[in-house]
Image: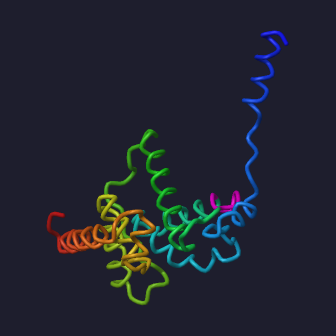
Amino acid sequence: MSVVGAKASLAATCFRPYARPDASAAARDHPMERTLDPARLGDHLDRLYRAAWALCGSREDAEDLVQETYARLLARPRLIRKEDDLGYLLRALRNTFLNQKRTESRRLRPDPLLDQLELVADPQARQPQAALEAGELYAAVAALPGDFRDVLVAVDITGLSYKEAARALRIREGTVMSRLYRARQQVVRRLEGGPA
């Protein structure tokens, strides 16, 4: 075989298109792995929406974020390893949020049209004061630094235990507790009108 023929044979072997293994076959090979069931994604919609609202600070952006997260998750089968659906969904939501923020930071921002925007109350809220307080609370949570915000959203907004939050965020349980304490303090200071 000539040198040119050997190089062509080597190139054909090395650059063969990668075939993704079947997700169900991979799940059978590893008992701690399973595929995400698309039919059960609706079970977590309320918790994800609350988490998204806390991340974004507005209802409309939260709806868009949850919709974008579900669109990405449903685009192809997802393999879950050693965790529950909610933890995986929260991490996907957070990653989608961070990707959107990175994209927004690269875009040019037009000047705002109005100096003062009016607050719009939640039409489904029982009292306007409750809607205003909820909006202020979610805005205060959204203004937290990322590490504190993620822990507060996981534990206080979506109701995960410290252990579940630690697993979902891939940090230690003690770190969850200390960040949660400091995040709560910062939210209280913000709501009372003091410096965060």
Q: Nearer the viewer, residue 119 or 148?
A: 148
Task: Tell me the quadrant of the picture where the C terminus can be found.
Answer: bottom left
Image check: 40 left or right of 56? right
Q: Position of residue 172 (x, y in %)?
A: 34, 66
Magenta-highlighted residues: 72-78
Q: Nearer the viewer, residue 101 or 75?
A: 75
* Residue 131 in which image quadrant: bottom left
* Residue 81 in which image quadrant: bottom right
Q: Nearer the viewer, residue 195 or 30?
A: 30
Q: Residue at x 41, y 62 (%)?
A: 170
Task: Tell me the quadrant of the picture where the N terminus can be found.
Answer: top right
Q: Residue at x 78, y 10 (%)?
A: 3
Looking at the image, the residue that sits furthest to the front is 1
Q: Residue at x 35, y 68 (%)?
A: 151
Q: Position of residue 7 (x, y in %)?
A: 76, 17
Looking at the image, the residue that sits furthest to the right is 1
